Structures are given as C-alpha cells and as structure tokens.
Image (cartoon, helix red, strand yellow):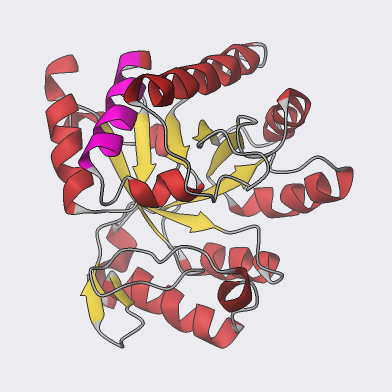
Amino acid sequence: MASSDISAKKIDLNLNLAEHYGLGREAFERDLLPFASSANIATGAHTGDVFQSNLALKACLDYPNLSIGALISYPDIVGFGLRKVQLTRDELRATILAQLGALAALAKQYNYELTHVRVHGYLYYQMLTNYSVAETVCKTIQDFSQWLVLVSPYSKIIREVISWVNLRVSYEARIDLRYDAEGHPVAYDFEKDANTDMNLIADRAKKLIYESKVVSEEGEENRVLYETIHLPSTPKNSLEIAKLLHGLVPNLSSLKEFDYSVYLPELL
C-alpha cells in the first residue's frame, strides 16, 4: 500500500491486559489502554487470575469503543506460556473452552460479548507451522462461537485452516519483534527484544503502515497482510511505542467493526 492511499486502510491496535498479579503492572497497562482499540484479556492460563481479569474488564468500561477479546495460551504459569508444551487434541480443546467460557461469563456482568480471540506464547508461534494445532485451535474457537474473530499473524497454514473451519481472522503484525525470511514473527527474546531502539521501532512502524512490509533478520523485505497491530507491554519503552503507533495510524478501527461478510457471507 502506497503512502498516498494509507488513509483508506482501517487499522486496529490490540493490547494485552491482566498479564500480572500486582497493582504496579495493572497501572502500567492502564497507561497503555487509551492508545488501543481492542483489548485481549488474559484468561489465567499463562499469567494472572480471575481477579486480574475482572479488574481489566472494569478498566475497559472507560473506553466504550474497545473490542473485548480473550488472550488464550497453553496452561503454563511457570513459563509464562512460552515453554514448549505438548497437549493432545482433546486436552488442547478442553483448555481453550475452559479459558473462553470463564472469561465470557465474567465479561457478561459488564454487558460485554467477546469479539475476538488472540493466542499467546508458544501456542501463537506453533499455530503458524503446525496444521494439527492450528486446526484444533481454530475449530474450538469456531465451535464456541461462530462470531469470534481469530487474531493471528498471517501464514499459509492459518489461511488454509480458517477456510476449512469457516473461521474469521484478523491478521496481526508486530513492530516489537524480528521477522524471519518467511514473513513470520520470530519468538520474543528478552535479551534481543526488550530494549529495541526507538529509531528502529519507528522505521519498522513506518514501513509496516505505509508500505505493508516488514524486514527480515536477513535484511529482506516481505509484504504482510494485516488488519491489526499489537501494542506490546513487555518492552521498557512500551508507552513510547503505543504513542508512536497511535500517532501513525490514520484510521483507527476496533475489531468489533470487523467486516464479517468477508469470511462468512452466508451467515448474514
């Protein structure tokens, strides 16, 4: 997309919430919340608990245009969802349903209906290359609610699987992560990614927003499909990144404004 027609593209900015146990972290997430158009509430599988999820939902009430979704992962509190967990199909399906069901029930007291599901950690990256895992996740989400939108990076496997199971997807791009030669985000590395220079972040953001491109670690440019950009909360300069992205996005649009007819016209 050329810079001349960037104003025509609607972009969502999604933010993770409830990824903590302490009030200090909660306050930091609230600082980032004004720059987001969609919020992904952690379900307690990789961090947080029902009390933190409840606090996050209450915080979202101050932003009525926010889309509210679930942040699901492998059950891995010790490893923050980043360890290489292996579950059977039935086990993976069960934990996803439990996570979605608990958050959906909690959200109802605030008159929220979940609009989307974002996947976290090792499960996030595994879905990009593993047909079995991707199909299990997508089919389980679709079975839970046919109106939910999957938030995931683009990959050929994801594209194929969502067509099999008839699931909507909003492809996600990142400026806080490195990309590989295939155009997939590289797993977060605390040493390499926690303190990325803002000049590099700004260059990545402009290339993504104005050209729909990312640069791989090898220096190659790849065009990426995306409708949403993740606002990271792990880097020390997360607030600066959020302000930068919010300022660069010309047409902010939440995931609850997603065009469902693109994927499931027969349901409308």
Quadrant of the rendered image containing residue 183: bottom left
Does residue 255 appear to the left or right of 16 in the view shown? Answer: left
Q: Can residue 253 be seen in this view?
A: no
- Relative vertical location of residue 206 with respect to residue 23 in this rendering, above or below: below
Identify the residue shown where x is 24% and y is 29%: 167
Q: Is residue 232 magenta?
A: no
The quadrant holding residue 170 is top left
133 in magenta? yes
Q: Residue at x 67, y 11 (%)?
A: 109
- Apparent side of residue 114 relative to residue 239 in the rendered image (left or right): left
* 99 or 4: nearer the viewer: 99
One can see residue 205 in this view = yes
Q: The N terminus appears in which quarter of the rendering?
A: bottom left
Q: How many marks?
A: 0
Q: Nearer the viewer, residue 37 or 157?
A: 157
Residue bounds of the magenta highlight: 131-143
Measured as percent of width and height from the top left, residue 228 is found at 40, 52
Q: Where is residue 46 in the image (x, y as percent from the top left)?
A: 62, 39
Question: In the rendered view, would you say 190 is above or below 32?
Answer: below
Q: Is residue 211 left or right of residue 58?
A: left
- Seen from the viewer's position, the closer of residues 12 and 152 is 152
- Give the vertical position of 268 relative to 131 (above or below): above
> Which SS does the magenta portion mostly show?
helix
139 lies above or below 262: above
* Residue sitting at x 68%, y 28%: 57
Question: Residue 233 at what x, y percent from top left?
Answer: 65, 57
Left or right, 58 with reference to 86? right
Q: In the rendered view of the protein, which quadrant contains the C terminus?
A: top left
Residue shown at the point (30%, 36%) measured from the top left? 133
